Image (cartoon, rainbow, N blue to C red):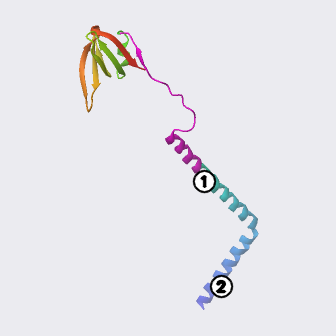
């Protein structure tokens, strides 16, 4: 007998749920349409993000101006502003040096000259230079 009462209670509960569900069929369709729209918006945002990442990685998108760098002559007084830059030097003795300006200490320039598989660092006196150019 208990099984029958439990079964009847379940049937009554299901019929009540079905009655309420049947009354709100229009609202259920509207809710489903809103859920589909939200899913589509989310998918379109994800695709837009993926496309933006692809453009950033490939370098597409806005046209970028490419500034051509060239070696330009600078005076001995303003060379300390270019620490860390690539430089080309020529001494009065005819020696040409190309490398990175590591530091400036008074009248001495410290240059890292890049060689085949390494680099050499050495000081060069500013007063012994006949030419001084900086890549900018």
Q: Quadrant of residue 24?
A: bottom right
In front of the other: 71 or 101:
71
Please say if 100 is above or below 39. Answer: above
Among numbered discs 1 and 2, the one appearing first in the sequence: 2
Q: Are marks 1 and 2 in contact (CB under 8 Å)?
A: no
Q: Residue furthest bottom?
A: 1
Mark 1 vs mark 2: in front? 1
Q: Position of residue 128 (x, y in %)?
A: 27, 9
Residue pictured at 54% horizontal, 42% vertical: 55
Judge left or right: residue 27 versus residue 64. right
Q: Residue furthest front?
A: 94
Q: Quadrant of residue 124?
A: top left
User: Judging from the image, what secondary structure is the residue with disc 1 in?
Assistant: helix
Kindly identify which residue carries mark 1. Answer: 43
Kindly identify which residue carries mark 2. Answer: 8
Please say if 2 is above or below 111. Answer: below
Looking at the rendering, the stretch of residues picked out in magenta corresponds to: 46-75
Is residue 24 in view?
no
Q: Residue furthest top?
A: 127
Residue pictured at 72% horizontal, 64% vertical: 29
In front of the other: 9 or 128:
128
């Amino acid at each position: 007998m208990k099984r029958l009462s439990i079964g009847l209670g379940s049937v009554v509960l299901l019929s009540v749920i079905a009655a309420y569900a049947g009354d709100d069929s229009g609202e259920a369709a509207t809710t489903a349409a809103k859920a589909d729209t939200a899913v589509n918006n989310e998918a379109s945002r994800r695709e837009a993000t993926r496309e933006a990442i692809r453009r950033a990685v490939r370098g597409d998108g806005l046209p970028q101006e490419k500034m051509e760098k060239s070696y330009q002559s600078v005076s001995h007084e303003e060379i300390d502003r270019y620490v860390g830059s690539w430089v080309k030097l020529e001494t009065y003795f005819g020696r040409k040096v190309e490398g990175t300006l590591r530091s400036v200490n008074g009248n001495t320039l410290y240059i890292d000259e890049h060689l085949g598989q390494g680099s050499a660092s050495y000081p060069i006196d500013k007063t012994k230079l006949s030419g001084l150019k900086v890549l900018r």
